Amino acid sequence: MRPLVVIGNVNVDLILGPAAPWPKAGTEIIVDHDELRVGGCAGNSALAWDSLGVDYAIAANIGNDQFGTWLKDAFAERAGGWPVENIGTTLSVGITHPDGERTFFTTRGHLPLLSFDEVRGMLDGERLRGGLALLAGSFLTDALTAAYDDVFDWAEAHDIAVALDTGWPLDGWTDANCAATIGWLRRCRLALFNEVETTTLTGLADPAEAACALKTHMPDDAIVVVKRGPNGALALGRTGDTVSVAAPSVKVIDTIGAGDVFNAGFLAALAAGMPLKDCLRTGVTIASEAISTLPRAYGKPLSAFLQETTA
C-alpha cells in the first residue's frame, strides 16, 4: 500500500442542532444534541483513516490553549511534532438544520500560521516516497498556502502525488480564488472537489463536462473526482475514462465533513491499488455512514472493502 499523508487544517468543531427556523436576535432556543469533536478538512480525513485502519502521517498545528492540547491528544504519537502557535485554537461552531445542511461560525485562530517550514519539519519525505498527499483547507492556512510552490516542489522531489481539496473560500468563489485554484491544480495529480466547486471553477453546468474541463488544467495522468452528495460521485480517470457510483439512501443527521470523509475513503482505496470505481464506492460508502450516525461512525475497515473487491 502506498503511504498516505494529510497536510492542512485541524481545528475544533462544536456541533449543535438541529435549529429551525433561525432564532431571533436576543432569544434562546433548545436543540436536541451537541457534539464536540475534531474538525477541519485534514482532521476529518485523518479520523476516517483511523477508522479504516490504515497507516498515515499528518502535518498540522495547534493553538496554545486547552483546545490545542485536546486536539493533539486525539492523534497521540502522530501529533508529536505539531507546532504550538502563540494564539488560541481555531474553533468552528456548526449549527445543523433539519434538512441536514449546516451553518458555520469560525474563528481564525491558529490555522493561518501553519507554515511550510513547519510542515517540512514534521514529515519524513523518504518514508512517504511514492505516496499520496492530501492537501486540504487552502483558504484557511494562509502562510502555508502562500508557499504552495514549495509544497509541490517537496512532493515532486519525493515522487508524492498531491490530491487537492481547497475547501470553501471564506469570501466565496471569486475570480481570484478560482484563478488561484486552477494554478494549484496544474501541479496536482488529483482533484477532489464537490459538484458546485467543479462547475463554478469551469463555468459548466454538467458535472461530467466540468470534470473534463478541469482535467485540461492538470497533468495528463491526473484524476478528477466530483463529489455529488446524495447523487454519489464520479471520476475522470488517468486515461480519460469516466466512472460513477450512486449513493445509498440514508437518513441524514449532519453533513459536516462528509466530503473530507469521502476523501479519506477514496484515497485509502487508491493507495491500496483498488480500481477507480471501487475507490469511489469506498468513499461514498463511508461518507454515507458518517452523515447518518450519531455519534459519528465510519463503518467497516478498508480490509473489508479489499476483500469485496477481490472476491
Image (cartoon, grey):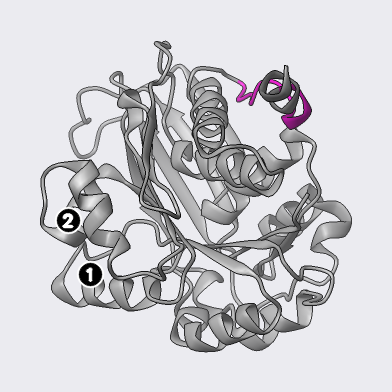
The residue range painted magenta reads 295-304
Per the image, the residue denoted by label 1 is 178
Q: Amino acid at mark 1?
A: Cys
Measured in 3D between alpha carbons, the distance from the residue under mark 2 to the one under mark 1, in whole angstroms, is: 8 Å
Q: Looking at the picture, which amino acid does disc 2 mark? A: Thr
Q: Nearer the viewer, residue 258 or 278?
A: 278
Q: Residue furthest front?
A: 239
Q: Is residue 224 above or below residue 79?
A: above
Quarter-of-image position of residue 274: top right
Specify the quadrant that holds the C terminus.
Answer: top right
Q: Is residue 167 left or right of residue 275?
A: left
Q: Is residue 101 above or below residue 272?
A: above
Residue 301 colored in magenta in the image? yes
Horizontal side, residue 135 vs residue 207: left or right: right
Please give the name of the residue rendered at 23% of the width and 43% of the height, measured from the top-left corner.
208
The residue under the point 37% across, 44% down is 241
Contact check, label 2 and label 1, Cβ < 8 Å: yes
Helix, strand or loop under label 1: helix
Task: Identify residue for label 2.
Answer: 200
Q: Residue furthest right?
A: 77
What numbered label is drawn on residue 57? none
Q: Position of residue 297 (x, y in %)?
A: 64, 23
Residue at 56% x, 88% y is: 150
The number of numbered badges drawn on the structure is 2
Q: Residue at x 43, y 26 (%)?
A: 254
Quadrant of residue 22 in the image?
Answer: top left
Tell me if I can see residue 197 in this picture: no
Rate crowding at label 2 as few (under 14), some (14 to 19) or many (20 or more) other CA atoms within 10 Å.
some
